[in-house]
Image: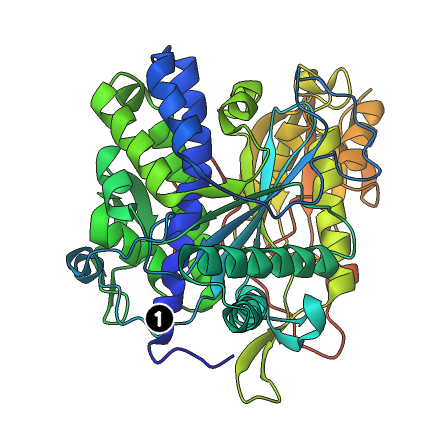
Amino acid sequence: MGEPADRSRAALAGTVTGRTLVALLSAVVLTASGYGWVEVNKVRNGITTTDVIETHQPRAGATTTTAVPGLDGPQDILVVGLDSRTDAQGNPLPQAVLDQLHAGSNEGELNTDTMILLHIPADGRSAVAISFPRDSYVQLAGGYGKHKLNSAYAYARNDAYSELSAQGVKGADLEQQAAVAGRKNLIKTIEDLTGGAVTINRYAEVNLASFYEISQAIGGVTVCLNQPAKEFHSGIDLPAGQQVISGAQALAFVRQRYDLPRGDLDRIVRQQAFLSGMVQKVLSADTLASPSKLNALIDAIKKSVVISSGWDLLTFMQQLQGIAGGSVRFETIPTGQNVISSEGQSVTVVDPASVHDFITGLIGGATTSTSSTTGATTPGNDRITVDLRDGSGAPNLGASVLDELMRDGFVRGEDLTIATRPTSAVHYGAGASADADKVAAALGGKVLTEPDSAVPAGHVRVYLGKDYVGPGAQGFRMATRYVIPSTAVTTPTSPSITAGGVPCVN
């Protein structure tokens, strides 16, 4: 597939993918707030559906006991942002709206420029959202060869469009049937890329429609920039620091790709940070108490969201009301260096085996860490305070590791940065050897434990070294198993993002 003339335009779809997850979570808001059922039913009756999932059964091999009535096992939901200038019903967006959003020209390409796999374990108490970079160089399903991941939809859709046109199919039927072919090919490509780690059983898709309305409806989103940002292609013009953004500048915040240290990877972090802020804002008392804001959310959902057939979104969301806290975390698949493909395009090297291991690790952690109603994987973790001494040399890794330990039920202690050290260790005081073993096990079982009289009672002290590759390290450095053969690996330095707090990003 050819590159659009305005490459920055491809980033636009990332915004609406964030809005998709917020739209899904906003259904929780509507039901939990006692909003009138007649109004809530407008969402159910107004959402566009697409028949792209062969079965709605749980992921193959799942053994987790269902803790939420009606939730039929773990959910693997592919959330897609489509680079399109129409709404969910196929109606063109007004030019005035496109101009206001600094959308640029329409080159006729329909690439899926943001793809997020949302995994929800069977108990419905947490979620992990895994981003797939658009330029990942992968084998496409459907026999199309090796290309950028974001073209999997376009290849199949365009082929189906040509074939159906030759058969005399026209108008809306042509558009819808061609889109189904594209969606199915993208789903299969993602499943193949994970090496069978997931079987996608839900699908949600959005485009540029209603971004302006939804961001305005909730009164903006709080974000934080490490430095001022002003860039022509996206139209961004924002100062450094924490601020509330909406409308065109909110779109520009997640759209910018040029002039960022890591290009598209930093753009993904922007999207994740913005999405976490939107989740917080949608679930805030300010939104819950405002019928006008809730009505605006309903209108935006109906305009912008396409979901897979057989998915009763409102019933599903009622089953997931326990997810509404800071229990949504964001990750990105491991990637290697950027290279030039045989077609002359800049692409990002991806190793499917590494992606499989990475996702399997995340999904396994998400399932086990939420199996207890107390939030602790092992009883008694809540009496152990973990102090962190970060000598890894990777900025913010200590905070990420503490986040992982808190998900296992441990208590957050000090988080200090120390001089770089080669190895990791867990130190414990008198009589606390068993506590240290618990912490070491939670860190992957490969960290040595050592007695240390300086560690106070009830505490365990974790020293992170340059060798640390356990839980929390994803996104900061790759474990050996994630290294992509014959390439220099990408080493992100962004903070771990969850749906809580306001992380400062590039």
- Considering only vertical position in the picture, is 349 above or below 315? below
Q: Nearer the viewer, residue 44 or 129?
A: 44
Element at badge 1? Answer: helix
Q: Quadrant of residue 45?
A: top left
Horizontal relation, residue 404 to residue 356: left or right:
left
Horizontal relation, residue 401 to residue 3: left or right:
right
- The answer to whether one can see residue 480 in this image is no
Residue 157, image x and y in percent?
54, 66
Give the colour scheme of this rendering.
Answer: rainbow
**Quadrant location, the C terminus:** bottom left
Query: Circle 1 sits on which residue?
Result: 8
Identified at 57% across, 71% down, the residue is: 163
- Considering only vertical position in the picture, is 362 above or below 393? above
Q: Quadrant of residue 443?
A: top right
Residue 266, image x and y in percent?
45, 61
Residue 461, image x and y in percent?
68, 34
Identified at 37% across, 44% down, the residue is: 304
Horizontal relation, residue 211 to residue 94: left or right:
right
Identified at 29% across, 54% down, the residue is: 251
